[in-house]
Every structure is written in structure tokens, then in C-alpha cells.
Amino acid sequence: MNEQLQKEYEQRFRKTAEYRISVWKVLTREFFARWIRRDGTILDLGCGWGEFINQIPAARKYGMDLNPDSERKLAPGITFLHQDCSQEWGIGDGHLDAVFTSNFFEHLPGKESLRKTLDQAFRCIKPGGRLICLGPNIKYLPGCYWDFWDHYLPLTELSLAEGMELAGFRITEKIARFLPYSMSQGATPPLMFLRMYLKVPALWRYFGKQFLVIGTKPESSRAG
């Protein structure tokens, strides 16, 4: 499994690795940073080569992935958790201010694995903390979604939001169409287009094929 993940990442992302870093520099600074506390603790679930977690400002950072190559891609000071996300995480209850995940849940083998993962996220996030999920929306990708060997679990913004609610989260953002689909096909449009796109949500309804769902752990979840 680990060797297969290494090969898939290398084959799919090697040619556009530098461009992906540049894209995520824009996304972290100009969009996602609003939900991440600079003095907080964050986990990047399915961190891949660290494009998000290496660049998002936070006091304490974790990356979790089954790909052993991820560890050497992470910046110094980031704790790497090399494990199956559906098993108990090596993190204490209420330790995290946020969990972020991008284009990861579709790689899980089924909804039972996702359910266990959401349960772990809920346990480890502190009351008032967030689970931020970006991923392909099967409603707008009925065919090309399956062009990737390791896509198993089709989700929409509604099905994921329901699963998150069942795990205990309160949904605070639910955007059916957010970013375009994928950078793994080799397209590298100028970053100025991305900056413009983020500032004009009206464009999202035409080009967006990924959902953005954010859930908050209720304050009432505090112990006692």
C-alpha cells in the first residue's frame, strides 16, 4: 500500500509540484487563513506533500498520511503521523483547533472508514474548533471523477455535511461549487486568475466542481 501511494504521488504530481506549492500559497494566505488561528494547533489530514500545512501559519502543526514520502516533504517542526486515519489518532482529546483536509475523503475505501475518521476528528478538535473539508463534488463530476485509480468514495456537499452532523459537528459553511476540479492533469493557469477567482464568488457557480464544507464542534461539547 505505501509503495503504491509513493508511485501514485510521484506519477501524478511530480511535474506540477512547484506550481502546486504556488497555488496553495495563494489559497492559504488569501482564503483559508481566515479560519486558522495563528496561535493554534492544526492537523492536515491526508497531507500529501505538505502543500497546505507547510504554508499555513499556526503555532503547532501536524500532518497525517499513509504515504511515507510525506514526512520528508514536511517543513521542520511539523509532526508527522504515519497512520490509517480511521484508526485512533495519536492525539489527545480536544487538542486541535482545526483539522483541514483537501481531496482526501474520496480515497477512503467506504463510508464506514469515513465515519470513523470523522469521529476521530470530532474527538481531537476542541469545542469551538473547526473541520474544514475541500473535495470533488460527484454531482458535477459524473464521469471524470473515476479517471483516477484511487478514487473510491463519491461524495456531495450534502452527503458529507450529513455525515459530519452525525459525528456531532454543526455545519457553518456548505458551498457546493468552490474550486475547479484538479491540478493533476497538468494545467497551470497564471496565479493572477486564481486570485481573481477567489474574489468573485459568482464565477464559482460556473467553474467550481469541488465542495467546501466546514463544521464546528459545539461549545456544549466541553467536558462537564
Image (tube, grey):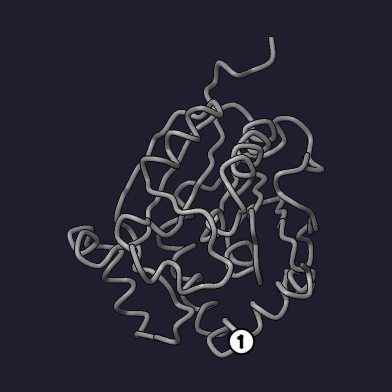
Q: Label 1 amino acid?
A: Arg
Q: Nearer the viewer, residue 97 or 69?
A: 69
Residue 194 against residue 172 in the figure, above or below: below
* Residue 108 in picture, x, y percent from top left: 61, 54
Q: Residue at x 31, y 64 (%)?
A: 198
Query: How busy is the neighbourhood of tag 1: few (under 14 within 10 Å), some, or many (20 plus)?
Result: few
* Residue 105 in picture, x, y percent from top left: 55, 53
Q: Nearer the viewer, residue 136 or 109?
A: 109
Left or right for 191, reference 199: right
Instruction: Determine which residue is flagged by label 1.
Output: 14
* Residue 48 in picture, x, y percent from top left: 65, 67
* Residue 172 in picture, x, y percent from top left: 39, 35
- Label 1, secondary structure: give it: helix
Q: Quadrant of the C terminus?
A: top right
Identity of the residue furthest to the top in this view: 224
Q: Residue at x 37, y 80 (%)?
A: 191
Q: Quadrant of residue 2?
A: bottom right
Residue 76 against residue 17 in the figure, above or below: above
Residue 151 against residue 222 in the figure, above or below: below
